[in-house]
């Protein structure tokens, strides 16, 4: 398979491409979130203040989100096999060099470059989609997106390596695993069918203007808002949850951390079920369910916490909070899959560009929302203000979706 040509039946080839891509994305996501663990030790080593630490931890999220649009376009132009491989090798090199960074600017630069690992999502979406017919693309992309569980892998394994060998060893080992994954991917996969067909026809790559032409469509930005909430909001809550539980309900840091990990894992795995459901009943119905339940859940979570004798009748206990939060996380996972079911259906010739933009906006949600949560807490003094913000985003998304669908009822319904 070294030349990227097809071997085996199309079904076998598609299954292999999906599972190898998903495994690769899991490793990429584990690397992308590496600062969640080693950043704490780096903060102590360099004596960073909270703002400096926040910038360092968020740098890979920011660069990974911004890179998605270019990586998505390059995948369409040059093929996912080569772009995915080079992305993994580049991120692996940056992660390895991080272990030898000794100053804050050096670590910021390394963090910015290793953010490429997060950009791999746009590559994988554009690479995997053409292997499957439209009626199975939701399931395929849902399974691929479940690679988000890589964040939990880092949270569970990295602390043991850090305690035993130091944070530099975490960076070196994660880099080695990512580089090995990139090589395995290159030598065991084929080019996707759409790229092979373009190569056989000797089609010239589209101009950059044509690649980005669909971005003039307001619908692309509507999908982006959905993903800003379903993915960006999910990531933001996973990061904010430990601080919230400790600050509001008095959980120990260990208990809050384990609960955040427990929130992250099912939320990643259920994304695969969201893809299956989108194929069965349509992504539009899944999005309606997601936004309707999310609006109710965020409204409940916006209520005052029950923490003392002065709690009102509408205050919610820690038990109710956790139950509603997990319901919210479940439907956010379904929504993540439903958004990406829409993209190859509406934009089959621009999956890379549109998928990259939607992924970029979602990733930026994961970067900016935690900052907004902190600012709102400082400005209002209200811990539930973060859920008030999410409630606003959900309601705007739901209204925009409903009005848009009413306007396009005469058009073919892909979702």
Image (tube, rainbow, N blue to C red):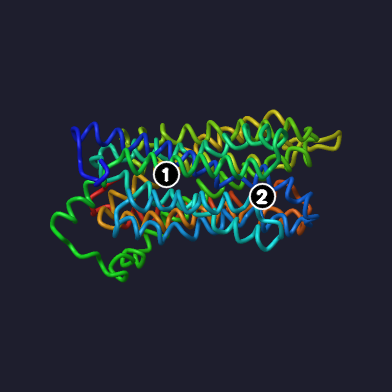
Query: In front: 89, or 52?
Result: 89
**What residue sits 32% from the left and 54% below the top?**
351
Distance, label 2 to label 1, CA atoms, is 38 Å
**What residue sits 50% from the left and 50% below the top?**
118
Label 1: which secondary element: helix
Residue 57: give x, y in percent of width and height. 65, 52
Question: Can residue 103 be seen in this snapshot?
Answer: yes
- Residue position marked by numbered label 2 in the rendering: 386
- In the displayed structure image, the side of residue 19 where residue 323 appears, left or right: right
Q: Quadrant of residue 164?
A: top right
Residue 28: give x, y in percent of width and height. 49, 44
Query: In front: 286, or 403?
Result: 286
Residue 410: give x, y in percent of width and height. 23, 54
**What residue sits 56% from the left and 48% below the top?**
233
In this view, 212 is above or below 252: below
In this view, 222 is above or below 310: below
- In the displayed structure image, the side of residue 106 where residue 328 appears, left or right: left
Q: Quadrant of the N terminus?
A: top left
Q: Quadrant of the C terminus?
A: top left
Q: Which mark is residue 182?
A: 1
Residue 195: give x, y in percent of width and height. 23, 52
Q: Residue furthest left?
A: 201
Q: Which mark is residue 355?
A: none
């Amino acid at each position: 398979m070294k030349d990227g040509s097809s071997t085996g039946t199309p079904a076998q080839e598609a299954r292999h491409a999906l599972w190898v891509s998903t495994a690769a994305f899991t490793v990429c996501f584990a690397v992308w979130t590496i600062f969640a663990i080693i950043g704490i030790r780096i903060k102590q080593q360099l004596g960073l203040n909270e703002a400096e630490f926040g910038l360092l931890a968020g740098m890979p999220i920011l660069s990974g989100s911004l890179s998605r649009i270019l990586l998505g376009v390059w995948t369409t132009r040059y093929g996912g096999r080569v772009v995915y491989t080079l992305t993994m090798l580049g991120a692996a090199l940056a992660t390895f060099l991080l272990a030898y960074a000794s100053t804050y600017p050096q670590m910021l630069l390394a963090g910015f470059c290793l953010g490429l690992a997060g950009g791999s999502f746009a590559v994988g979406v554009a690479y995997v989609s053409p292997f499957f017919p439209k009626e199975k693309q939701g399931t395929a992309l849902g399974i691929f997106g479940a690679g988000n569980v890589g964040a939990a892998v880092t949270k569970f394994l990295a602390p043991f390596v850090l305690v035993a060998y130091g944070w530099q060893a975490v960076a070196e080992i994660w880099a080695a695993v990512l580089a090995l994954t990139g090589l395995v991917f290159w030598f065991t996969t084929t080019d996707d069918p759409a790229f092979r067909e373009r190569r056989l026809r000797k089609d010239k790559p589209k101009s950059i203007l044509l690649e980005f032409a669909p971005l003039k469509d307001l619908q692309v930005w509507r999908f982006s808002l959905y993903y800003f909430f379903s993915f960006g909001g999910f990531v933001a809550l996973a990061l904010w949850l430990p601080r919230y539980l400790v600050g509001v309900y008095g959980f120990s840091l260990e208990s809050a951390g384990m609960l955040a990990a427990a929130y992250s894992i099912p939320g990643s795995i259920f994304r695969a079920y969201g893809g299956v459901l989108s194929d069965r009943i349509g992504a539009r119905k899944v999005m309606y369910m997601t936004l309707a339940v999310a609006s109710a859940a965020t409204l409940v979570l916006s209520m005052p916490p029950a923490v003392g004798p002065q709690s009102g009748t509408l205050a919610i206990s820690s038990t109710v909070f956790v139950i509603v939060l997990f319901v919210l996380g479940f439907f956010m996972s379904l929504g993540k899959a439903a958004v990406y079911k829409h993209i190859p259906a509406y934009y089959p010739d621009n999956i890379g560009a549109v998928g990259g933009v939607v992924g970029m906006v979602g990733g930026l949600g994961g970067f900016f929302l935690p900052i907004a949560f902190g600012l709102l807490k400082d400005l209002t003094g209200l811990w539930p203000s973060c859920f008030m913000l999410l409630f606003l985003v959900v309601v705007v998304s739901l209204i925009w979706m409903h009005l848009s669908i009413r306007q396009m009822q005469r058009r073919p319904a892909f979702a």
